[in-house]
Image: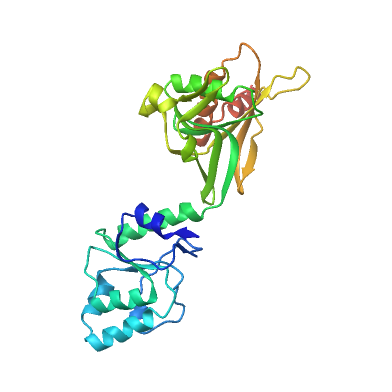
Amino acid sequence: MISALDFQKALDLECLVPSGKPEWDIRTPDLNRPGMQFCGFYEYFAFERPQVIGKVEMTYLEKQPPEKRRQILENYFEYRLPCVIICRGMSAPPELLEIAGRQQIGIFRTNLVTSKLMASAINYLNRCLAPHVTRHGVLLDVYGVGVLLSGRSGVGKSEAALELIKRGHQLVADDVVDICRIADQRLIGTSPKSIRHYMEIRGIGLIDIKAMYGIGAVAVSKSIDLIIELETWDENKSYDRIGIEDETIEILGVRIPCQMMPVKPGRNLAIIVEVAARNLSLRKMGYNSAQELMNSLQES
């Protein structure tokens, strides 16, 4: 369900006729321009989508005789439309406002051109309708790479994140990370508004990263490109020392590169996370240092 008020605020829309429903049952991020419907063709009419009236549709309505225009709009508003958005700041015909008010269908207006309004609305609906999941961890922007630090409570995630922030990287979320899939192979992480920019450090308590380190130390959201799993060093466990095999973790159907990082006294986790982020960037550019070494050894 999409909140009518949130939709209006997010797109900065002027309300001409209030919506009779506080929420709309919208299940796709697409919109519909009713040009064919105004011409009388209602087959395959996507009435469940927000309706957008641009210059073409409005010009067509204005050129119709008043009786025909009223009949067009009466037929159009028989469907349970979520809302109608008028672009370019155009004035709505009185018949449109009257019939919409009677049917309790919200009418909004924007000064944006049609293409820009549709792009903004589709982007907003994509985020609202995207699959969501909540994960425990710390999300940071490290050299432009979205790094999610995960692991059991008390392993040192927040301490490593704090050192990374001191080194100039950005905090996105601490402890609770809201993840949504906005594309087939892209995940975006953000923090709940109630705890955004806050970090918990054991022995100190909650600290406000934005107030302490400045606005440049925080970010609202970031794509999740790499997951680093922190675990206490186990002397009896064999850890990967070359990095030939790529491990991944699936979140919302998307495979994300994952690296296991053992933690023990004396290891500088912040530097290791920085190296992991840079190494991922190199791999995306087609350079794999471990593979290059193996190729070199095979050739010698």
Quadrant location of residue 85? Answer: bottom left
Q: Residue furthest bottom?
A: 67
Q: Quadrant of the C terminus?
A: top right
Q: Residue at x 56, y 15 (%)?
A: 268
Instruction: Give the answer, above or below, for where 203 lies relative to 148.
Output: above
Q: Residue at x 27, y 64 (%)?
A: 87
In depth, the one of 50 and 254 nearer the eye is 50
Query: Can residue 39 be seen here?
Result: no
Instruction: Give the answer, above or below, for where 13 lies relative to 191.
Output: below
Point out residue 113 in the picture as x, y percentages from the top left corner: 26, 60
Point out residue 171 in the picture as x, y percentages from the top left corner: 46, 30
Q: Residue at x 61, y 49 (%)?
A: 253
Point out residue 146 in the picture as x, y percentages from the top left corner: 50, 34
| Numbered disc total | 0
Point out residue 71 in the picture as x, y percentages from the top left corner: 32, 86
In depth, the one of 152 and 113 nearer the eye is 152
Instruction: Give the answer, above or below, for where 242 lies relative to 219.
Output: above
Q: Residue furthest right?
A: 236
Quadrant location of residue 69? Answer: bottom left
What colour scheme does the image use? rainbow
Horizontal side of 87 relative to 236 (left or right) equals left
In depth, the one of 288 and 241 nearer the eye is 241
Horizontal side of 134 relative to 50 (left or right) equals right
Q: Residue at x 35, y 77 (%)?
A: 102
Quadrant location of residue 123? Answer: bottom left
Query: Can residue 252 be seen here?
Result: yes
